[in-house]
Amino acid sequence: MSTPTGTAPAPDRADAPRIAYDRVGRGAPVVLLHGIGHRRQTWYPVMRELAPHHELIALDLPGFGASTAPAPDAPYDVEWLVDTVARTFSGLGIERPHVVGNSLGGAIALELGARGAAASVTAFSPVGFAPAGGHAGLRALAAGARVAGLVPEPVRVAAAASPPARSIARRVLRGDPSSPAARRLAFDATLVNAGSPFVRLVPRVAGYRFTHTGVPCPVTVAWGDRDRLLPPSGARTALRRIPHARLVSLLGCGHIPMADAPRLVAAEILQTARSA
């Protein structure tokens, strides 16, 4: 799959971050948003399935992948990310695309849908719907990131590459930790440098809640039944907030279903887009 790349600024601000993206395919545009600490390449297996049907735009969220982060003293939370992605749509010349997101990206997609900025939304394990105390995994990440940032980077990198740490990463992030695709998985220890985008953002994400009482477009909320980072029970909360949402359980999938079952993920995106 050929994936033309580029960077786009939010058009109305000189200090806006540069947003890296891949753009491929033809048809109604679909924007793909990754989770915290990830990057746009996570969508590549899904893009291969979708490219014959849609124009696809996979973004690196600000501070991750090849996109720049906001200044250290600038706002940096979910609302700011939603604003930035919405401005990026204008910079790319697209209006009301289908928006797809995983985890943090799923929350951004739903927020854009609530604003009327999306033709449809497909959210995979979105943050913002855990019951009280249910974001324990994200809060643990936030606390662990702050502590890990005090450790010299070479020590952190070596620890993350150790067999026990790799085993934890596979179990947290994959539906089947023993699958061949998960064998090389490891946490990226460079993310937790003091003051890094991940360290700055993860506490804000852990405290975020989706508070809208509706989204005026077709919505699918899909959750891996083996998601060990965000509990699948969040789907029930999502249905209370968005009563017309289509709920899907992704059997055998973990928190990042694009890695576990890209064809299944692509099928859910296509079905949601067609309903619009």
Image: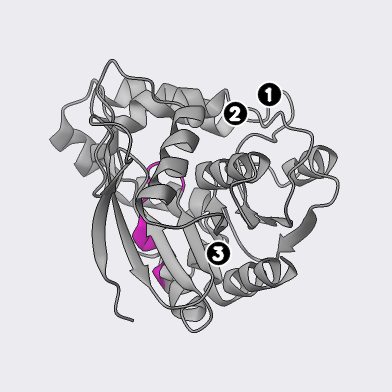
Given residues 188 and 208, the one toward you in this image is: 208
Are the residues at dot 3 and dot 2 in contact (C-beta closer than 8 Å)?
Answer: no
Q: Residues within 10 Å of mark 2 (few under 14, many from 20)?
A: some
User: Considering only order in the chain, which callout, 2 or 3, is on the residue closer to the N terminus?
Assistant: 2
In the depicted structure, whether residue 265 falls above or below residue 209:
below
Q: How is the image coloured?
A: one colour
Q: Residue 49: x and y, percent? A: 50, 80
Given residues 32 and 202, the one toward you in this image is: 32
User: Considering only order in the chain, which callout, 3 or 1, is on the residue closer to the N terminus?
Assistant: 1
Taking the magenta stretch, the answer to whether it contains residue 40 is: yes
In percent of the image, x 76 and y 42: which residue is there? 238
Q: Label 1: state its secondary structure.
A: loop
Q: Residue 46: x and y, percent? A: 48, 72
Give the CA distance from mark 1 to mark 3: 26 Å
Given residues 111 and 35, the one toward you in this image is: 111
Which mark's residue is nearer the viewer, 3 or 2?
Answer: 2
Are the residues at dot 1 and dot 2 in contact (C-beta closer than 8 Å)?
Answer: yes
Give the CA distance from mark 1 to mark 2: 6 Å
Residue type, numbered disc 2: Ala
Q: Label 3: state its secondary structure.
A: loop
Q: Which residue is mark 2?
A: 136
Q: Is residue 125 left or right of residue 53?
A: right
Taking the magenta stretch, the answer to whether it contains residue 148 is: no
Residue type, numbered disc 3: Asp
Q: Which mark is residue 176?
A: 3
Task: Please identify the quadrant where the N terminus is shown.
Answer: bottom left
Q: Quadrant of residue 198?
A: top left
Q: Is residue 164 visible?
A: no
Q: Label 2: state its secondary structure.
A: helix
Q: Which residue is mark 1?
A: 133
Residue type, numbered disc 1: Gly
Which mark's residue is nearer the viewer, 1 or 3?
Answer: 1
